Image (cartoon, helix red, strand yellow):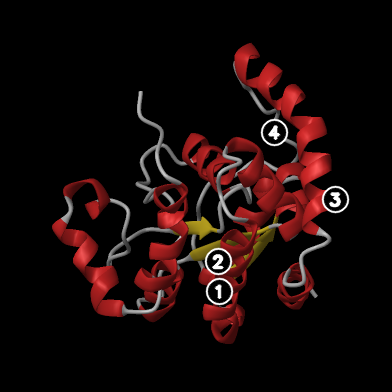
């Protein structure tokens, strides 16, 4: 099997920055059938998204298990999706995680990804929506994993919605093969975090993170 070049591996993060800057490019995703259900429309019930490895999928799965009849667009990790949700007043949750941990998790899955590109992509994503951060619910990773229902409760209070939720910790149900993989990656992620701390731009990424949770 031919391995993808380093450029192609990093292209999704480079393209997200480009797509995230232009509303017309974001709207053009409608032309691609596989993205059609992932973008926000005026009648979308809820938007849950954020940078990769920030509990996006976990929160969507929890929400969907509590609200089986509500269609939740899949995450596409584009800031324009958040901006569009705010524009249409769609109930919106943005997940966020300390960049040392989210970026290390991304790099552990694919070591060919560029540290610099992923860090810049993180900074870009959250800076692009920083001016409207008071117009959506911010779901910090650790709090979301500990009590995802609390995030939905806050959403209901803010938007006057009545989505169903359960308070308390939700057990992570993963196949044993996934658990084994996570265990093998644990040491690698620690090493990656040590390397990331040496990158000049990681301090800027952490400052962005703190500006959202404080």
Q: Distance between the residues labelled 1 and 3?
A: 22 Å
Residue 124 numbered mark, or none: 1
Mark sitting earlier along the chain (3/4): 4
Front of the two marks 3 and 4 = 3
Residue drawn at x 38%, y 64% as measured from the top left: 15
Crowdedness near tag 2: few (<14), some (14–19) or many (≥20) residues, C-alpha within 10 Å: some
Look at discs 4 and 1 and give the one toward the viewer: 1
Contact (CB < 8 A) between labels 2 and 1? yes
**Marks 2 and 1, how far apart in space?**
5 Å
Residue 25 placement, left or right of 198? left
Q: Which mark is residue 170?
A: 4
Against 43, residue 73 (above or below) is: above
Q: Mark 2 points at which residue?
A: 121
Q: Hey, which quadrant is residue 41 in on the image? A: bottom left
Q: Which part of the image, by quadrant, shows the C terminus?
A: bottom right
Give the camera-side residue of 121 and 82.
121
Q: Are marks 4 and 1 in contact (CB under 8 Å)?
A: no
Mark 2 secondary-structure assignment? helix
Q: Which residue is label 3 attached to? A: 194
- Please tell me which residue lies in front, 76 or 110: 110
**Which percent across, then down, holds residue 212?**
71, 74
Q: Where is residue 190 in the image (x, y as percent from the top left)?
A: 83, 41
Mark 4 crowd level (few <14, some 14–19, many ≥20, 10 Å Cα): some
Picture quadrant where residue 118 is located: bottom right
The residue drawn where x is 73% and y is 45% is: 147
């Amino acid at each position: 099997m031919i391995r993808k070049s380093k450029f192609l591996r990093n292209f999704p993060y480079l393209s997200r920055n480009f797509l995230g800057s232009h509303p017309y490019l974001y709207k053009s995703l409608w032309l691609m059938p596989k993205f059609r259900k992932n973008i926000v429309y005026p009648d979308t019930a809820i938007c849950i998204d954020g940078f990769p490895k920030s509990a996006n999928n976990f929160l969507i799965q929890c929400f969907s298990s509590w609200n089986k009849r509500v269609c939740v667009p899949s995450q596409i990790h584009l800031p324009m999706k958040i901006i569009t949700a705010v524009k249409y007043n769609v109930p919106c949750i943005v997940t966020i995680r300390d960049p040392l941990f989210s970026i290390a998790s991304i790099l552990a899955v694919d070591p060919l990804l560029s540290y610099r590109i992923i860090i810049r992509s993180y900074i870009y994503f959250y800076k692009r929506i920083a001016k409207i951060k008071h117009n959506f619910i911010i779901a910090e990773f650790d709090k979301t994993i500990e009590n995802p229902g609390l995030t939905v409760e806050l959403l209901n209070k803010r938007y006057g919605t009545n989505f169903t939720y359960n308070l308390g910790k939700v057990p992570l149900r993963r196949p044993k093969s996934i658990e084994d993989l996570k265990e093998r990656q644990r040491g690698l992620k620690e090493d990656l975090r040590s390397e990331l701390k040496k990158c000049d731009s990681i301090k800027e990424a952490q400052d962005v993170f703190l500006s959202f949770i404080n």
